[in-house]
Image (spheres, rainbow, N blue to C red):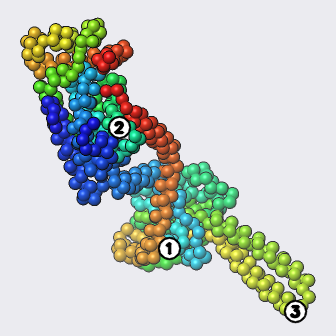
Amino acid sequence: MPDGPTDTELLLASRADPEAFVELYRRHAEDLLRYFARRTLDPEAAAELTAETFAEAFASRTSYRDTGANGVAWIYGIAKHQLGRFFRHGRVDGAARRRLGLPERSLPMEDYERIEDLVDFQPIRSALVEALGTLAEDQRAALQLRVIEELPYPEVAARLACGETAARQRVSRGLRKLAIVLQDRGLEPATEVDV
Amino acid sequence: MQTDFTFLRALEQDLERVARDETARSVDGRGGGVGGRGGRGDGPDRRWKRALTAVAAVFVLAWGIGFVADGGGVRNFVATSDSADELTGPMPADDDGAGGSPDRVRVGEAGFDNLDGNEAPEDAPAASPAPVSGTPGTVSGEQDGGRALSGELTKIIRNGRLRVEVEDGSFRDARAEVVEIAEDAGGLVLSSRTQGRSGTFTLKVPAATFDRTMVALGQLGKVELEEQTGQDVTAEFVDLGARQRILKTQRTAIEGFMARATSLPQTLLLAKRSAEVQLELERIQGRLRYLSAQVEQSTIEVLIEERSVPEARVEDEVDNPSLLQAWRRSIQGFFNVVAVAIVGLGYLLPLLVAAGVYLGVRELRLRRRRRDVDVPLDR
């Protein structure tokens, strides 16, 4: 339990004092990023979904009603909604960020591996191997090297004869598709991880 | 923020900036909320502005649709009730000022190419948007381009004005032809005024031959101006007819009371009342006769001038505008615009209903979602 105001109090206060919302963000941004990373397996998608969820929450905060539950549950409700849309459409909607005027930010290189570290691939490794067959050749090769053989990105790039940035993007895109494939097959990555 | 993620730190800065901006807007009194979905985060002023903008947009759209649906004009919505004084002049078409403006069509030179040749149809439908032909004072729906008026009951006073330019030296011939045209149409030249090589003639012709006469007059030379007016007096006819019946009933009743009157005061009172009813009855009957004559007989004023007649002499015929007329026209114009917009709203109604259903369903889904998110999730 954090010191100071509760999440609910911060959300309610943010109606009149928008900067109170930033405190709520500081408290829960990393947890939400982990939430998305474990479900999408994709660092880029997880980062985008985190940004979009907080943007949507900020824009809609005046509609929040205190029902006695922790205020952050409201934000996770939005997150769940965003995640559902991501799995349905295979991409992250940026409407809320555009509405707020938040800039499009690409994921910094150093964050890729940190976000991947949030995901424990061990429990789903066998399912991953099976699902790899559904991916394009370049993405499958990138995932094979990065996720199965656990090679660092410079080594993955060297094996694929491409730049490190391209290697990261192939892994990211492959993981995104993989998450969707697993979702379609009823294997939610996060469920496996959380068990 | 204590985190290793560069992305999250950048996002924090972005959110701080947005929050600061919104705080500044709130302080400036511009209302809170930045881009909240459906305006939920907006201040009341902004919501009102949006609502007013939406209403204005719907009105403009409705007006546009109504304008198109009405055939690009507002003439079908012109009021037609006029006072007796307005009808006493030789050219009612000139008197826009009172109560209602008659339907009016003014056509310039370009619109009369077909009237210069022999192939022009006698009833000239292209130049006669307020058509009446056949029985005087009636308009058939088919002839009227879709106006759903009752042909049997409709009473319309039709008048016209023409300015025709003839070749130099042919004014006298044209003047003779005007008389001939009036007689051929079953009418007469009511008055005329000539001045050198130009003259103004006022013709009275049966309404049934109005269109034919206008075409024939137009063929005298080059049409510089044509103006036709149609003044619907049906409502006044019906009203006067009803009042006439009531007064006749009253008169009969009064006569009955007078026959049974037993005292002098009663008799005097009833006699006075009888005289009042009779006076009113005769006034109404006179008005009905006048209107009937106007409906049955159209007035056409034609100005004929030779080509070389200076323009200044023609300008004498131009109406001088008055502020009163302008004011009345502006009122009429306002109601015309509203009427056209109402027509457009009728066309838009299905879309507005669909939009309402959509917004309602959307609101229900949003409320359901709000209920859902109040349930804590397993992270």
- Residue kind at label 2, given as amino acid type: Asn
Secondary structure beneath dot 1 equals loop
Q: Are marks 2 and 3 on the same chain?
A: no
Relative horizontal placement of residue A189, taking residue B24 as reference (left or right): right
Q: Residue B231 placed where, x, y %?
A: 57, 65
* Real-space CA distance between mark 2 and mark 3, rounded to the nearest whole angstrom: 97 Å
Q: Chain of mark 3?
A: B
The quadrant the N terminus of chain A occupies is top left
The structure residue drawn at horizontal position 33% and vertical position 50%, both measured from the top left corner, is B42
Q: Chain of mark 2?
A: A
Q: Are marks 1 and 2 on the same chain?
A: no
**Residue B164, placed above or below residue B13:** below
- The reply to whether callout 2 and callout 3 are in contact (CB within 8 Å) is no
Q: Residue A101 placed where, x, y %?
A: 23, 42
Residue B97, which numbered label? 1
Q: Nearer the viewer, residue B141 or B78?
A: B78
* Residue at the disc numbered 3: B264
Q: Nearer the viewer, residue B212 or A144?
A: A144
Instruction: Judge whether residue B236 can be spotted in this image.
Output: yes
The quadrant the C terminus of chain A occupies is top left
The structure residue drawn at horizontal position 15% and vertical position 21%, both measured from the top left corner, is A113
**Residue B117, placed above or below residue B17:** below
* Residue at the disc numbered 2: A70
Q: Chain of mark 1?
A: B
Front label number (1 vs 2)? 2
Q: Residue B322 placed where, x, y %?
A: 43, 77
- The reply to whether callout 1 and callout 3 are in contact (CB within 8 Å) is no
- Residue kind at label 3, given as amino acid type: Leu
- Residue kind at label 1, given as amino acid type: Gly
The structure residue drawn at horizontal position 90% and vertical position 83%, both measured from the top left corner, is B259
